[in-house]
Amino acid sequence: MEFNVAVLPGDGIGPEVVAEALKVLQVVSEKFGHSFHLREGLIGGVAIDTLGTALADETLKMCKESDAVLLGAVGGSKWDNPQAKIHPEDGLLALRKGLKLFANLRPVKAFPMLVDSTNLKPEVVKGVDLVVVRELTGGLYFGQPKKQWRTAKGRHAVDTLAYSEVEIERILRVGFELARSRRKKLTSVDKANVLQSSRLWRQIAIEISADYLDIELKHMLVDACAMRFIQRPAEFDVLVTENMFGDILTDEASMLAGSMGMLPSASLAGIPRGKTFGLYEPIHGSAPSRAGQNLANPIATILSVAMMLRYSFALETEAQAIENAVLATLEQGYRTYDIMSNGKTRVGTKEMGDLIAQQLKG
Ligand code: IPM
Ligand code: MG
């Protein structure tokens, strides 16, 4: 089969991890006889430097014309000045919004062979297999007003956590549907003891749960959820939550898998069915201090390619082949710096990519 993929490497370690993911995609194409037509575009700091905008119209257009988008990471200290007019992250947010990718799926699995590289006790991490469904185009990231201003009393700033019923219902349904395809447990995470937006969220969750009587729905406050993640994480199946809550909780959850460098993500415009357009990116950032040194762990991006094959191209066998190649490579003891532990073989970004590609070739 033939597919068009927009590739946006971005900043920092982005280009390095994307290169390894493309190596693996190339092996999939040879082994299974598919053609992936790649078109590369600019986003983030590199787009600011060359085009003066974090997301050029042509990049957005190219993504819309593709079957899926693969993204590395954006950002870096060079563009971090809080007084700057544009930030690399604006490009990513505009892309998510422009492509209407409201449903961000972030699976977190404890890799048995990595338990000694986590900071948590093996018995806590054992059996973790959860997915955070993060709302991605609303909430605190996008609500208006969002601005800074000055009065006689000094400087002020506001961000707004706003949600409509439509936005809440559609993301909750993604959570319910996903739970239905898994262990049938859904935890809706909110802050309903304080926030109006969360009270509406919880109310709508209760109402639509009538359509999902086979799913066990629980409500959890976000602060309690943060605690529960390191107390009894294996109890979770699917979680569904607001944009910013999901951002924070998934960085925390990455520690259950051993490293941020292990977590892939899919951002979709609806409930995954057949071939769903999506954007695939690791959950980690651009890690500028690690860039250009062949250090970064490419596994999160390689696993993001597996998610792309699964959700956007309906190539489940190929997706599993990548996931198995990653597991086998870890099983053989190869580790990048972030998941290194005693007695294992330390490798760089390129070597990890090569090993996984080789493993996939069989
Ligand atoms: C993520 C990142 C982004 C976010 C940044 C880079 C804007 O942290 O994908 O989790 O906050 O969504
Ligand atoms: Mg984040």
Image (cartoon, grey):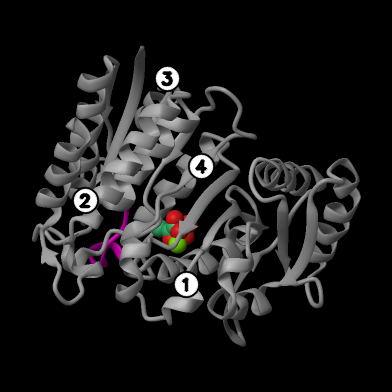
Label 3 sits on residue:
65
**In the structure shown, which secondary structural element does the residue marked by tag 3 occupy?**
loop
Q: Is residue 58 left or right of residue 226?
A: left
Q: Is residue 190 left or right of residue 252?
A: right
Q: Which residues are magenta?
A: 72-80
Q: Calculate the distance from the C-alpha at mark 4 to the C-alpha at mark 3.
A: 16 Å
Query: Mark on residue 267?
Result: 4
Residue 228, compared with residue 264, is above or below; it is below
Instruction: Give the residue at x 79% y 57%.
Output: 217
- x and y, in percent, of residue 142 in the image: 60, 54
In front of the other: 17 or 358: 358
Residue 56 in view of the camera: no
For ligand 2, give the image quadrant: bottom left
**In the structure shown, which secondary structural element does the residue marked by tag 4 occupy?**
strand
Label 1 sits on residue:
125
Q: Amino acid at mark 4?
A: Ser
Q: Amino acid at mark 2?
A: Thr
Give yes or no for residue 77 being in the magenta stretch: yes
Task: Tell which tag, 4 or 2, sits nearer the viewer.
Answer: 2
Instruction: Give the residue at x 20% y 43%.
Output: 356
Name the quadrant containing residue 118: bottom left
